[in-house]
Amino acid sequence: MTNPLKSKSGQKIGLVALVSATYAMVAGGPFGLEEIIQTSGYAHALLVICIITPLLWGLPTTLMVSELASALPETGGFYVWATRALGPFWGFQESWLSFAGSIFDMAIYPILFSTYLVRLLPMLGKGYTPFLIGVFMIVVCAAMNLRGTHFVGEESIFLVLALLLPFGILVWYGFSSPDTATASTHLTKPDLLAGILIAMWNYMGWDNASTIAGDVKNARRTYTLAMAVALALVIVTYLVPIVAVAHAGIPASDWETGAWVSLAGKLGGQKLALLVTAAGMLGALSTFNALVMSLSRVPYAMALKGFLPKMFGRENSYGAPWISILVCSAFWALATVLGFEATVMLDVLLTGLSILLEFVALVALRIKEPDLPRLFRVKGGLVGAIFLGIPPAVLIAITCVRNHAESVGPFNALTVGVCLVLLGVVFYFVGERQRKLS
């Protein structure tokens, strides 16, 4: 019997394209790390970025995704996992949490794209032009996604290589500079915990790659290897540029949000600063483009299960869920109009809760379907699967405690997050009632 969640697309992507798409979803380059270095100093920042966060957050998540993707390599990914393991209610909540989190994440990439472009061409910074530039980026990404997963996957390879090239030049300049001691700026009270919370945001997105499993060649094997390679690539591309800048003697106090451009200017001059600015545009574009590919598959999978109108399950000749892509893109454009920002608190909270639900699904499937074929299996049996989710759960709890006083406009961020979680419960029962009546 044919699985209804297997994509009808004829062309599928391979390992390199999946690694590139995953890297774009998770990192999109070393942007976003600047505040960690400024508040924690080089030594503590490297400890957070390259050891603590990868071990407590990145590695457990990639291992979980590897097992579940190898066991259930279906379009819809995490929605399929949660539904199979925990039932339709939790499958819906998994999708809702992921999509709600994306509101606070996706709106920022068009803004970043236009911000970097205005740096290159200041005359574009007037009036509504930056907003229109962001909308144009959304339209371009939607058009690329309408060409199907294979097209987006292949383009991800080019975009990732192009955005990393300027950082390769920056690294060369950094290590070519004489070694000095000025980089070891002493911080009396480095904010290590704040650094971990920011780094968590920079290590999120591994599960997003799961939603395109129906379009991946030999998905059961490919996902396991792709997660390992992508994790190593993220760590290396975070680590090496920071070490190069530290080697050049630039103090940690020079780091601030968006500092990569000014740091590139100090190391390699105006031309390198312009290249890193262009890399910022490519990073925003590649991340948004890959996430459109991922997140648009969730309404598609839910439509095939009857939880959304059937039109969301329609595919074009390239095998792309075109209505889902267009509706999601329009929604994210609206979020940009309304001025939503990617707050780390809400993004980490909502996306983090969806990831914890995936860890629960991992354990539930071990109990319910112990004989389900898994080409990759987390070591340690059921106990190992349970303990794998403990470090991420602790970090999410710390996030809530640490940032309970953060505000989103006039509201407490934690309160907004809880309301969004409860809204998913309401939407499920309203949708379930309509589904039974139809």
Image (cartoon, rainbow, N blue to C red):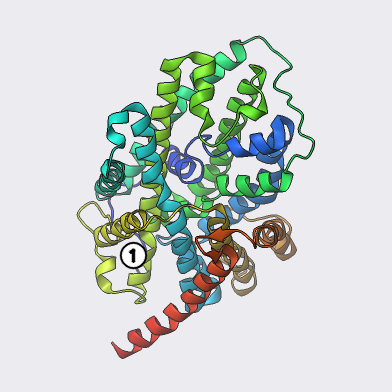
Where does residue 363 sit, x and y in percent of width and height? Answer: 64, 67
Question: Residue at left 50%, top 34%?
Answer: 258
Q: Is residue 87 above or below residue 217?
A: below
> Which residue occupies the foreground of this view, 182 or 378?
182
Instruction: Give residue 115's quadrant in the image.
Output: top left
Instruction: Give residue 13's quadrant in the image.
Output: top left
Name the side, left or right, on which 277 lies relative to 344: left
Q: How many marks?
A: 1
Q: Label 1, on which residue?
A: 300
Where does residue 409 sit, x and y in percent of width and height? Answer: 50, 60
> Which residue occupies the foreground of this view, 201 or 289?
201
**In the structure shown, which secondary structural element does the residue marked by tag 1 occupy?**
helix
Name the side, left or right, on which 244 lies relative to 332: right
Where does residue 395 sit, x and y in percent of width and height? Answer: 69, 56
Question: Dot 1: few (<14), some (14–19), or many (≥20) neighbours within 10 Å?
Answer: many
Instruction: Give residue 2's quadrant in the image.
Output: bottom left
Question: Residue at left 34%, top 84%?
Answer: 435
Question: Residue at left 70%, top 50%?
Answer: 56
Q: Amino acid at mark 1?
A: Tyr
